[in-house]
Image: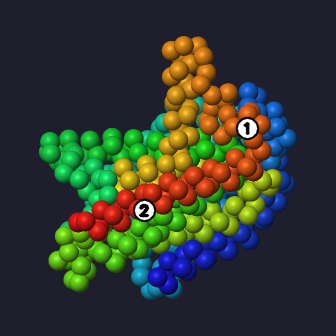
């Protein structure tokens, strides 16, 4: 528990104290946000606000995990390194996207092809590495089984090692792309994506702690049919705690009126981190409940696009969903706080389902 608290506390301090320094750096460089012209007119006042704040979230998380390892005297495992790799790798793709927007003075960054290549390289390499590095108990960071509350009987390796690995890479990259886009779409109002991410990763801290205490690798829990086969649940809790601290510290400056935006740097990094912890904790489908607020935002966009293509009419005044409420007259702070509350309900529901399954197992 000390390592988890240290990771969260250190990352919080780094983000809280480091963000204003980064803001001053961005202002000196004139690295400001560009606003889409078809968005709510109230957003035009945000033009020029420093962006790329995700850099602080990533660095704070890495430092938090590193200091936690020094304090506990235990080196980070393959699980934590893989989670940080996916988070940082996608964050670098987002950083390139943000920098391109600034350099070319437009609201569009990297070309779709460049973005796909960057995300594809990071996602594919993560998926391949995640099923390597067996520990003394022959458990790898991830398994090739599709998971809900734990691994299910749907084993992607059924067709053989090579084909199974290809199927797992496809499945993992679907999750990575889905969560990255979900956080990116949610990042449309001051503090919205940061606050929702904070809530979701708090749930994963608790989930990791529970899996750690009920791990099949512990002699006391090994005889329990409800024990968890996750390789490094402690490290999942540590990484999640570091992200919670980083988001908390960053939110101080990102809340309305935002002094800085996380940009694609932060959105892709947090989406990648969520995909990583869901895959490595073997709760891939449960994550869609815990992160239900992200799912709703994505669905609103899908519904809007699909309905418009079919009927040439719109369901919402504007998608994603938070812009619909904004154009309906809701205040930005009201929307953000209510979405945070809904995110908390989804996280609580997911954790309730997770715990209920353990009770009956």
Q: Is residue 152 left or right of residue 103?
A: left
Instruction: From the viewer's perspective, tell me whether residue 326 is left or right of residue 30.
Output: left
Which residue is found at the position 61% from the left and 77% from the top?
9
- Could you tell me which secondary element the residue under label 2 belongs to? helix
| Callout 1: SS | helix
Q: Name which of mark 1 and mark 2 comes first in the sequence.
A: 1
Which x, y percent locates residue 154?
21, 47
User: Residue 167 is drawn in which quadrant?
Assistant: top left
Confirm whether residue 275 shows in the render.
no
Please, which residue is most extreme toward the top here? 311
Residue in view at x 61 percent, y 76 percent: 10
Q: Which residue is drawn at 33% across and 43% down?
A: 171
Q: Is residue 206 left or right of residue 259?
A: left
- Measured along the vertical axis of the image, is residue 226 above or below residue 274? below
Q: Badge 2, how many Cα within 10 Å: few under 14, some, many 20+?
A: many
- Residue 237 at x, y = what percent? 45, 70
Q: Nearer the viewer, residue 167 or 252?
A: 252
Q: Mark 1 points at which residue?
A: 326
Which quarter of the figure is the C terminus placed in? bottom left
Residue, disc 2: 351
Please give the name of the residue rendered at 44% of the width and 51% of the height, measured from the top-left corner: 289
Q: Is residue 282 above or below residue 72?
A: above
Q: Which corner quadrant of the image does residue 141 belong to?
A: bottom left
């Amino acid at each position: 528990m000390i390592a988890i608290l240290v990771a969260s506390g250190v990352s919080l301090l780094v983000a809280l104290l480091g963000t204003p320094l980064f803001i001053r750096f961005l202002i000196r460089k004139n690295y400001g946000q560009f606003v889409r012209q078809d968005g709510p007119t109230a957003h035009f006042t945000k033009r020029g606000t420093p962006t790329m704040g995700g850099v602080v979230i990533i660095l704070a998380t890495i430092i938090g995990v590193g200091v936690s390892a020094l304090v506990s005297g235990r080196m980070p495992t393959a699980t934590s390194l893989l989670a940080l790799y996916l988070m940082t790798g996608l964050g670098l793709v987002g950083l390139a996207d943000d920098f391109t927007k600034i350099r070319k003075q437009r609201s569009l960054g990297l070309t779709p092809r460049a973005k796909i290549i960057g995300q594809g390289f990071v996602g594919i390499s993560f998926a391949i590495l995640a099923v390597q590095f067996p520990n003394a108990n022959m458990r790898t960071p991830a398994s090739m089984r599709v998971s809900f509350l734990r691994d299910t009987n749907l084993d992607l390796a059924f067709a053989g090692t090579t084909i199974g690995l290809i199927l797992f890479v496809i499945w993992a990259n679907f999750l990575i792309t889905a969560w990255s886009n979900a956080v990116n779409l949610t990042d449309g109002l001051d503090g919205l994506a940061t606050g929702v991410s904070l809530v979701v990763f708090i749930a994963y801290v608790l989930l990791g702690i529970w899996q750690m205490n009920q791990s099949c690798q512990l002699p006391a829990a090994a005889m329990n049919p409800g024990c968890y086969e996750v390789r490094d649940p402690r490290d999942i809790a540590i990484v999640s705690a570091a992200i919670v601290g980083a988001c908390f510290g960053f939110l101080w400056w990102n809340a309305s009126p935002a002094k800085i935006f996380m940009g694609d740097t932060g959105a892709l990094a947090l989406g990648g981190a969520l995909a990583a912890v869901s895959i490595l904790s073997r709760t891939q489908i449960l994550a869609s409940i815990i992160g239900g607020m992200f799912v709703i935002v994505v669905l609103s966009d899908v519904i809007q696009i699909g309905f418009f293509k079919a009927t040439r009419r719109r369901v919402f005044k504007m998608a994603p969903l938070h812009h619909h409420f904004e154009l309906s007259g809701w205040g930005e702070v009201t929307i953000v706080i209510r979405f945070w509350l809904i995110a908390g309900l989804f996280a609580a529901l997911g954790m309730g389902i997770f715990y209920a399954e353990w009770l009956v197992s």
